[in-house]
Image (tube, rainbow, N blue to C red):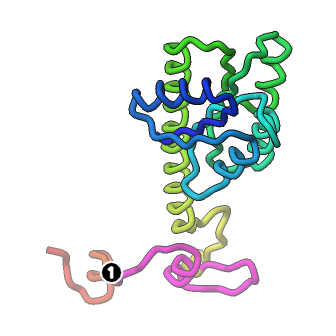
Amino acid sequence: MKILIAEDDPTSLLLLKTLLTQEGYELEAVEDGESAWAALCAPAAPQLAVLDWMMPQMDGIQVCRRVRAAQWRQPPYLILLTALDRKEDIVIGLEAGANDYITKPFHKQELLARVRVGERVVHLQNDLAHRVQELEQALSQVRTLQGMLPICANCKKIRDDEGYWHRVEEYISAHSDAVFTHGICPECMVTLYGIAPR
């Protein structure tokens, strides 16, 4: 799991890097909001980010809003980190698009626990996106016949939407991915050729 850390305070940045590196996470660290936004837009971008609220150029709230406005298919999990701890601030952060909110000074184990929650959510999102992709591929390969089909009671031809009549196998082949092979059923063997089935 690759994690983006956006923190302009050197002490907090060092603490975060040390803590998360020890847990085996791959890190990308930046010191301002513009760099955080660029990192999140890059190919193979981190899928989890710890963003400081107060940063130069663009604050963490603005980064959250931009990410949510982008409506990515697999948006990153955003943890907002800030010294602002009023209930009103927490609401602002979450409504801006943060998935979680941690106040400074943070407790190490709490931070790690919240990062692990984010990691689980990212894995679930990835699994879901993969299954959706598989479903879309499957649906693109499936063509179905639906509704009422007018069929001749005598010759069994099917009438299309334009009023033309087609043999059953022609119509089904044109409207589905079915492939027909031909044979003779036992009843027709008797009727047409007088040969009894074995």
In front of the other: 36 or 68 = 36
Q: Is residue 109 left or right of residue 50?
A: left
Where does the image place residue 191, in percent across and percent down from the top left?
32, 83
> Is residue 164 part of the magenta span, yes or no?
yes
Relative to 156, residue 40 above or below: above
Circle 1: is it few (<14), some (14-19), or many (20+) Cα within 10 Å? few
Q: Amino acid at mark 1?
A: Cys
Residue under the point 54% across and 76% down: 172
Regarding residue 155, the answer to whether it shows in the image is no
141 or 136: nearer the eye? 136
Q: Residue at x 69, y 33 (%)?
A: 8
Magenta residues (range): 158-181
Q: Residue at x 58, y 50 (%)?
A: 45
Residue tagged 1: 188
Quarter holding residue 197: bottom left
31 lies above or below 132: above
User: Could you say which is closer to the camera, residue 83 or residue 164?
Assistant: 83
Residue 68 is one of the magenta-drawn residues: no
Outermost left residue: 198
Q: Quadrant of residue 166?
A: bottom right
